[in-house]
Amino acid sequence: MLRVNDQIQIADWELTETFSRSQGPGGQNVNKVETAVELRFEAERSPHLAPPVKARLKRLAGRRWTLDGAIVIRAEETRSQARNREMARERLVELIRAALVAPKRRIATRPTLSSQRRRVAAKQARGALKTSRGKVEDSDE
């Protein structure tokens, strides 16, 4: 059981962990110990998440979202399998918490009349400055 917040808890059947050999340095230990963790969360089939939350979660997960509606998180930072498991679970919880926050609706506003006038006045001043940079004609002759 993975606790996201007071209302949402993810059941064990929704999570699958597979272990593999980690990449990178680690001496002889890296060749024999499977410390890397791949956590798979069946998000699409989860009864604990509402459809809008699933949609936001899919957008936030990006490439980690599979075609069959699962989120795959890989953790291989440390040499400890237990710590990598914790890190993968923490990342999943953070991702779900971020998806739970509904974005605020943007309210379209119009620019004020004074701001429009300031903008036009600034454009006219800039245009006048550029016009004054034109060729200087000889008025001696």
Image: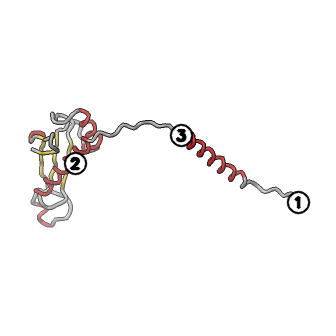
Q: Quadrant of the N terminus?
A: top left
- Asked if 127 appears above or below 109 in the picture, the reply is below
Disc 3 to disc 2, C-alpha distance = 40 Å
Q: Nearer the viewer, mark 3 or mark 1?
A: 3
Q: Nearer the viewer, residue 50 or 7?
A: 7
Query: What label sits on residue 140 in the rendered view?
Result: 1
- Mark 3 and mark 1 lie on one chain; the one further toward the N terminus is 3
Amino acid on which the number 3 mark rests in the picture? Thr
- Asked if 68 appears above or below 93 in the picture, the reply is above
Disc 3 to disc 1, C-alpha distance = 49 Å
Query: What label sits on residue 94 in the rendered view?
Result: 2
**Residue at x 12% of width, y 66% of height:** 28
x and y, in percent, of residue 24 in the image: 21, 61
Left/right placement of residue 60 relative to residue 8 reads right
Left/right placement of residue 10 relative to residue 57 reads left
Disc 2 to disc 1, C-alpha distance = 77 Å
- Mark 3 and mark 2 lie on one chain; the one further toward the N terminus is 2
x and y, in percent, of residue 51 in the image: 23, 32
Task: Give the residue number, with chain letter if any, for mark 3.
Answer: 112
x and y, in percent, of residue 11 in the image: 10, 40
